[in-house]
């Protein structure tokens, strides 16, 4: 019997059109995508396919020109930026290719930062940040600044930061893009554990087939639309066939 899908994110006929002078440039062309709670999804595609724009839509970082975006059943397509910011802070944890750590803050301080905006008391946020850094294997590096950490360690800090408000969804944009293959595999194992052991929904944007195959499902974008069957694509990736 097929398990019923409980959608956490659903895009319905989403268009995003950018104006460049007098020219309209569509980045998304009626994109429809459904992501269930507990999914681990890779979004792939060539440069210009709409991956980054799709990530912005899924992560409530931008609103569509037309179409609907549902997050836990609520249409967020027309919400104000302040409302979107609240939803992002509580529901979605972000991991970026460039890590986006503040260089003047320690690892511990970087992880506590999102909790400040949610009004978490100081003692609680420090204790939680310590626990998260220990969970990602950085218990002995929490007082070091980003410049004193390797790329893999910085990404671990970013993962800990993404978890600080206990989000339902982890959105990872090229999470291994600046890492060597060994460290990248370690980061993917960490993300897989968050999905498998903690039930986090993981949505990962990547151009790397070796990274994408860690997911349970692959969606291939081209010209702002989903173009290929994700199950067939994933089977090919796991056999080592990239195209």
Image (cartoon, rainbow, N blue to C red):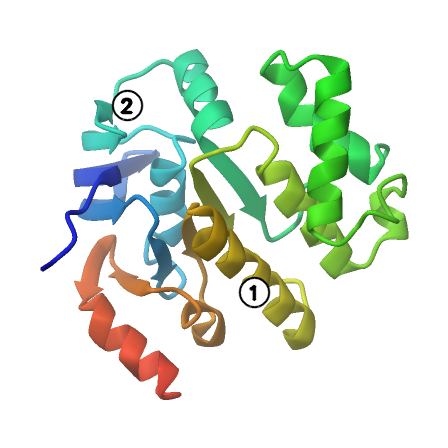
Rendered location of residue 156, percent (x, y): 69, 51
- Give x and y (percent) for residue 242: 36, 82
Asked whether 233 or 4 is in front, the reply is: 4
**Does 74 appear above or below 105?**
above
- The residue furthest front is 1
Eyeballing the image, is 24 above or below 113?
A: below
Q: Is 109 on the left or on the right of 175, as rendered?
A: right
Identify the image quadrant of residue 7: top left
Q: Mark 2–mark 1 contact, CB under 8 Å? A: no
Q: Which comes before the other along the chain, label 2 or label 1? A: 2
* Mark 1 Cα shell of 10 Å, populated few (<14), some (14-19), many (≥20): few
Rendered residue at 21%/55% (across/down): 225
Residue at 70% in and 12% down: 121
Position in image of residue 99 (x %, y %): 67, 47
Q: Is residue 158 visible?
A: yes
Label 2 neighbourhood size at 10 Å, few (<14), some (14-19), many (20+)?
many
* Secondary structure of residue under mark 2: loop
> Which is in the foreground here, disc 2 or disc 1?
1
In what element is the residue under mark 1?
helix
According to the picture, the residue beneath numbered tag 1 turns out to be: 189
Which of the pair 104/25 is nearer the observer?
Answer: 104
- Whole-number angstrom distance, CA of label 2 to CA of label 1: 32 Å
- The N terminus, quarter of image: bottom left
The x and y percentages for residue 71 are 29, 30
> Could you tell me which residue is drawn at 75 percent across and 46 percent down?
134
The quadrant in which the C terminus is found is bottom left
Identify the residue under disc 2.
76
């Amino acid at each position: 019997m097929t398990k019923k899908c409980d959608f956490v994110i659903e895009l319905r006929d989403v268009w995003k059109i950018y104006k460049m002078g007098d020219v309209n440039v569509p980045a998304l062309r009626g994109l429809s995508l459904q992501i269930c709670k507990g999914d681990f999804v890779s979004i792939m595609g060539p440069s210009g396919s709409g991956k980054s724009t799709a990530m912005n839509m899924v992560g409530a970082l931008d609103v569509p020109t037309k179409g609907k975006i549902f997050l836990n059943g609520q249409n967020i397509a027309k919400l104000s930026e302040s409302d979107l910011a609240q939803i992002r802070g509580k529901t979605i944890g972000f991991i970026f290719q460039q890590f986006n750590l503040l260089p003047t803050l320690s690892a511990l301080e970087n992880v506590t930062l999102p909790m400040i905006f949610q009004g978490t008391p100081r003692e609680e946020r420090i204790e939680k940040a310590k626990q998260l850094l220990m969970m990602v294997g950085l218990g002995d590096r929490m007082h070091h600044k980003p410049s004193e950490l390797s790329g893999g360690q910085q990404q671990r800090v970013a993962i800990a930061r993404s978890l600080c408000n206990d989000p339902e969804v982890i959105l990872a944009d090229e999470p291994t893009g600046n890492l060597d293959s060994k460290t990248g595999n370690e980061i993917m194992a960490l993300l897989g554990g968050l999905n498998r052991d903690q039930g986090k929904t993981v949505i990962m944007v990547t151009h790397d087939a070796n990274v994408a195959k860690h997911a349970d499902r692959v969606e291939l974008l081209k010209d702002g639309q989903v173009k290929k069957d994700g199950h067939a694509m994933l089977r090919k990736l796991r056999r080592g066939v990239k195209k």
